[in-house]
Image: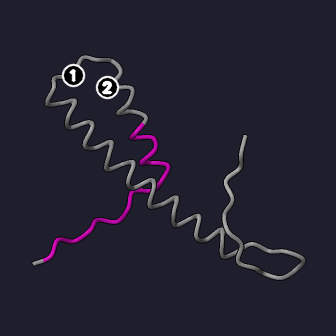
Amino acid sequence: MTAKKSPPIPFEVALAELENLVKHLEQGDLSLEETLQCFKQGVSLVKNCQVTLQHVERQVEQVMERHGQLETLPFVEAVD
């Protein structure tokens, strides 16, 4: 029997949960076991966010419009 994958958590929800985990960890009042659990949950949330961002990046690449015509353009990260 194969394990079913749960649907991804919405990006904003995952990001908010990650921020809460970081705040909780920064307080420094967790046991080693609790810290490890928070770390594992954080890694899972980061992976979820990365998958969502990669999906959105592919959509942006596919739906860029130039001079009235749709073109596939690569996503270019802005440099500060």
Circle 1 sits on which residue?
Answer: 30
Q: Name the colouring of the figure.
A: one colour
- Chain-order first, disc 2 or disc 1: 2
Q: Amino acid at mark 2?
A: Leu
Residue 66 in the image: x percent, y percent? 84, 74
Q: Position of residue 36 (x, y in %)?
A: 20, 34
Q: Which residues are magenta?
A: 2-18
Residue 25's tag is 2
Q: Give the crowd class for mark 1: few <14, some 14-19, many >=20 residues within 10 Å.
A: few
Amino acid type at circle 1 is Leu
Is 10 covered by the magenta stretch? Answer: yes
On the image, the x and y values in percent for residue 61 come to 66, 71
Residue at the farthest left position: 1
- Disc ID at residue 74: none
Determine whether label 2 and label 1 are within 8 Å by CB.
yes
Secondary structure under tag 2 reads: helix
Name the image quarter holding residue 68.
bottom right
